[in-house]
Image (spheres, helix red, strand yellow):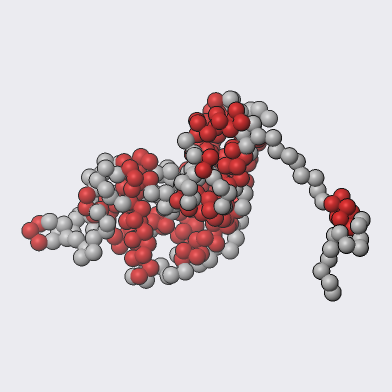
Amino acid sequence: MSALSLTDDKPGLAQSICTKMPAIATIEPDWDRWRAVSTSSAADIDRCWTCGACDNGCPVSLATGRLRPQRNVRMAVYGMLDRLLALPDIWYCLSCRRCLQGCPNRVKPYELNQFLRNEAIRRGIYSGDFISAYQKLFAEFQRVRWRTAGHCFNDKLDHLQDQTWYQWLKKPIRRAPYRPIVMVQGRNGHPSRDPKPLLHSQFCFTCSECSGCCPIICEGDVFDPQRIIRMANLGLSDELLMSPSIWLCLGCQRCTDACSQTVSGHEIILQLQRQAIEKGVVDPNLPIRLLEADRIIYPKFLDEIDTLIGLYRMKP
């Protein structure tokens, strides 16, 4: 069979195919708004060449397909500011900076989302009540992530019923009863150290710079980078290896960037994760189970955000 030609002996074929294709709307760039976004967002959107690396690194995109950092950047380049402010996408972003880490041109879609959020608030599209409700939901979602990680220690999360979802969302993590921390003493009365100490963790003097910039720190019992580093320094690594908390880190590296003592918080947490697998505390398939679980819990999280937008959005 010969290859199909649209021009040889069937002159009407090309026209019939074209008439069945959906119309493509022409985008007229608004250069004034592009310039305003470009200069105000600190996102370096002009460097984007639409390679899609940001989409491939975004955990929300990978889990749901409902957040497209590349699309948002391109819309900003075309000056489609009003359209962007109307998208729920700007509230889906976790500010984890994974989009930046994968971008060869160092474009910062998360900074664009932050600019758009601030602009939506400035314009009165969203009220202070919405911001409070959103922050509360974001904090509660970290409880879901904590409980999901704990569940995945022993089993795969195949589904999550609405009743369980709201129970995990609303019920605080049980606080461990207070007990004095006794440091394991070595020679000459100094704390004993692991022969392979965690990366520069001994330099930490608990200034809270890491905790102050962490995007997911909402409840200390759920996740707190300073607490994790401090527990490791006090000889409580075994407790950390059994905790779901070390699996909540988004890898944004803000803690490392902020630390004036060159403590690599995200590397310490990665090292703890590796130790948990190497020592058999968790099995090697746990990271895979967590990624699969994200496809269950993240869509529910985005649905909750959509509900808040419907309740609190002030203007169309």
Q: Residue at x 49, y 57 (%)?
A: 148
* Residue 72 at x, y percent in the picture: 59, 42
Residue 255 relative to residue 230: left or right: right
Residue furthest to the front in view is: 8
Q: Residue at x 50, y 65 (%)?
A: 288
132 relative to 49, above or below: above
Quadrant where the N terminus lies? bottom right
117 relative to 123, above or below: below
Q: Residue at x 86, y 55 (%)?
A: 14
Q: Residue at x 34, y 70 (%)?
A: 279
Residue 316 relative to residue 242: left or right: right
Q: Nearer the viewer, residue 10 or 116?
A: 10
* Residue 124 at x, y percent in the picture: 59, 25
Do we see residue 107 in this rendering? yes
In the rendered picture of this protein, how many numbered marks are placed on residues? Answer: 0
Quadrant where the C terminus lies? top right
Q: Quadrant of residue 90?
A: top right
* Residue 227 at x, y percent in the picture: 31, 49
Q: Nearer the viewer, residue 167 or 210?
A: 210
Q: Quadrant of residue 240?
A: bottom left
